[in-house]
C-alpha cells in the first residue's frame, strides 16, 4: 500500500461528521488508551446534551503537562477533535508514549454550542478567543471597528466587499485586519465580539487551571484552530511578547517558522482578549502557549462568511440567506471536505504535538 493511501485511511477515520459524532469518537478513542485517565465533562447551560469533554492522561502529579485544546472557535472543533482522536490512537497502539514525569490534558469541544451550530462564537455571541479581558476594568476600545461598523451591514455583498476594500486601502491592510478581527466589545451582533462578562468556555479553562494547579507546572499548550492562513498549512502562532523567554522557548521547540503576530511575522494580527492570556500569566519562561492554525480558503472568504452569518443570526438585512445555508458555508470554510487538507492537518498536528511533547519533557 503506498504511504499516501495509508495516511488517507486513518485521516478519514478520525474526522467527525458532527459535534455529536466528534464527542463519541473522542470518547471511544480515549477509552482505548491504557494510561491512567481521568475524565471530566463540563455541561453547557444552552442545552442538556452539550458538553465540553476533558481528560487528564498520565500521572496526576506530573511536573510537565502537554495541553491540547480543540473547539475554542466552535466550528473549528472538527479538526480539533480529529487531532486528539489521532493522538489517542497513537497512544493506544503503543506508537507513542508519554515521557517520564509528563502528563496530558486534552480538551475537546471547548465551545460545544458553536461546534454544534457551526459558528465560531458561543451561545451568547461571544468569541471566546476575545473573552479573556479584565471585565472589572473599562473594556478595550476599537475605534476603527466603530468606523467600519456601518459598512458591515451593507446588504448587497458586492457593494459591501467594495466598501471594505476601500476602507482597507484607506487604513492599510494590517490595520484593517486588526480593526475587523482584533476584537470588539461594543457590538454583540458583530463578528469577533468579546462579550461583557465571562463566557462558559472561559469558566471551563479557569476551573481546569485552578483544579489541576497548572500554575505550578511546566506547560506546553497547543490550541488547534482552522480558517486563517495558506490552505492546508498549519502555522504555529505564538502571541507571547517578542523577546520574552517564552518566545525563545517556542522557537527552540517549534523552530524558526513560528509566527509572532506582535512582530508582524504571522498570518494572524495582534488581538485583544485571547485565550492565550489566561495561560501567559501562569507560565514561566520555560513554558509556552501556541495556536496551531490551519489555513483554509483565505481571509477574504473568512471575513465574507463571518459577516453573512452574523447578519443572518442577528436577523438584520435581507440577504435571503438562512441559518442552515450559512452553517453549511461556515463548515466549508473552517472544515474543508477535502482529503488532502485533512491529511495535511493530521501530518502537521503529529509533528507539532511531538515537538511540544519533546520540548516540555526535556530537562
Ligand atoms: Zn479560531
Image (cartoon, grey):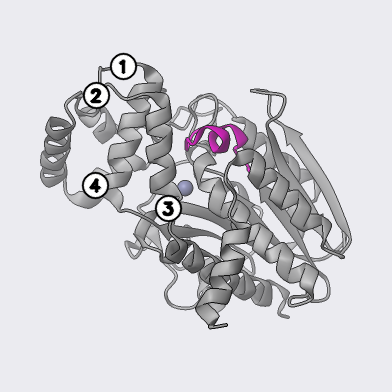
Indicate yes or no: mark 4 CB to ligand 1 under 8 Å: no
Tell me how far mark 2 sits from mark 1, CA to CA.
Answer: 8 Å
Tell me how far mark 3 sits from mark 1, CA to CA.
Answer: 28 Å
**Which one is in front in this view, the residue at disc 2 or the one at disc 4?**
2
Tell me how far mark 3 sits from mark 4, CA to CA.
Answer: 28 Å
Q: Are marks 2 and 3 in contact (CB under 8 Å)?
A: no
Image point 56% across, 27% down: which residue? 136
Image point 57% across, 60% down: which residue? 12
Upstream in sequence: badge 2 or badge 1: 2
Image point 49% across, 27% down: which residue? 195
Residue under label 3? 336
Left-right relation of 126 to 267: right
Residue under label 4? 175
Q: Quadrant of residue 166?
A: top left
Tell me how far mark 2 sits from mark 3, CA to CA.
Answer: 27 Å
Tell me how far mark 1 sits from mark 4, CA to CA.
Answer: 26 Å
Secondary structure beneath disc 3?
loop
Which residues fall within the magenta stretch? Answer: 109-121
Left-right relation of 110 to 309: right
Residue under label 1? 316
Amino acid at each position: 500500500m503506498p504511504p499516501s493511501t495509508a495516511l488517507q485511511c486513518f485521516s478519514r477515520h478520525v474526522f467527525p461528521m458532527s459535534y455529536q459524532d466528534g464527542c463519541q469518537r473522542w470518547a471511544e478513542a480515549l477509552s482505548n488508551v491504557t494510561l491512567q485517565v481521568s475524565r471530566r465533562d463540563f455541561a453547557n447551560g444552552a442545552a442538556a446534551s452539550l458538553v465540553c469533554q476533558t481528560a487528564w492522561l498520565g500521572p496526576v502529579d506530573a511536573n510537565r503537562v502537554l495541553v491540547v485544546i480543540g473547539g475554542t472557535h466552535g466550528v473549528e472543533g472538527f479538526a480539533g477533535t480529529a487531532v486528539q482522536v489521532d493522538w489517542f490512537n497513537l497512544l493506544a497502539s503503543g506508537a507513542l508514549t508519554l515521557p517520564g514525569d509528563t502528563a496530558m490534558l486534552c480538551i475537546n469541544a471547548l465551545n460545544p454550542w458553536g461546534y454544534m451550530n457551526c459558528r465560531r462564537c458561543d451561545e451568547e455571541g461571544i468569541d471566546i478567543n476575545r473573552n479573556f479581558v479584565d471585565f472589572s476594568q473599562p473594556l478595550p476600545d476599537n475605534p476603527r471597528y466603530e468606523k467600519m461598523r456601518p459598512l458591515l451591514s451593507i446588504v448587497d455583498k458586492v457593494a459591501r466587499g467594495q466598501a471594505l476594500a476601500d476602507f482597507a486601502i484607506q487604513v492599510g491592510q494590517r490595520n484593517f485586519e486588526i480593526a475587523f478581527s482584533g476584537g470588539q466589545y461594543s457590538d454583540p451582533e458583530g463578528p469577533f465580539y468579546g462579550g461583557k462578562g465571562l463566557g462558559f468556555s472561559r469558566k471551563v479553562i479557569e476551573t481546569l487551571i485552578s483544579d489541576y494547579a497548572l500554575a505550578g507546572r511546566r506547560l506546553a499548550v497547543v490550541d488547534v484552530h482552522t480558517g486563517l492562513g495558506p490552505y492546508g498549512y498549519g502555522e504555529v502562532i505564538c502571541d507571547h511578547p517578542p523577546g520574552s523567554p517564552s518566545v525563545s522557548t517556542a522557537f527552540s521547540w517549534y523552530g524558526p517558522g513560528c509566527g509572532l503576530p506582535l512582530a508582524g511575522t504571522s498570518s494572524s494580527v495582534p488581538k485583544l482578549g485571547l485565550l492565550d492570556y489566561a495561560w501567559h500569566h501562569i507560565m514561566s519562561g520555560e513554558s509556552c502557549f501556541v495556536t496551531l492554525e490551519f489555513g483554509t480558503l483565505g481571509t477574504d472568504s473568512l471575513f465574507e462568511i463571518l459577516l453573512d452569518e452574523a447578519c443572518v443570526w442577528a436577523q438584520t438585512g435581507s440577504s435571503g440567506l438562512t441559518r442552515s445555508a450559512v452553517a453549511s458555508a461556515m463548515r466549508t470554510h473552517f472544515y474543508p471536505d477535502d482529503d488532502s487538507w485533512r491529511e495535511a492537518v493530521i501530518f502537521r498536528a503529529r509533528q507539532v504535538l511531538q515537538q511540544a511533547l519533546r520540548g516540555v519533557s526535556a530537562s
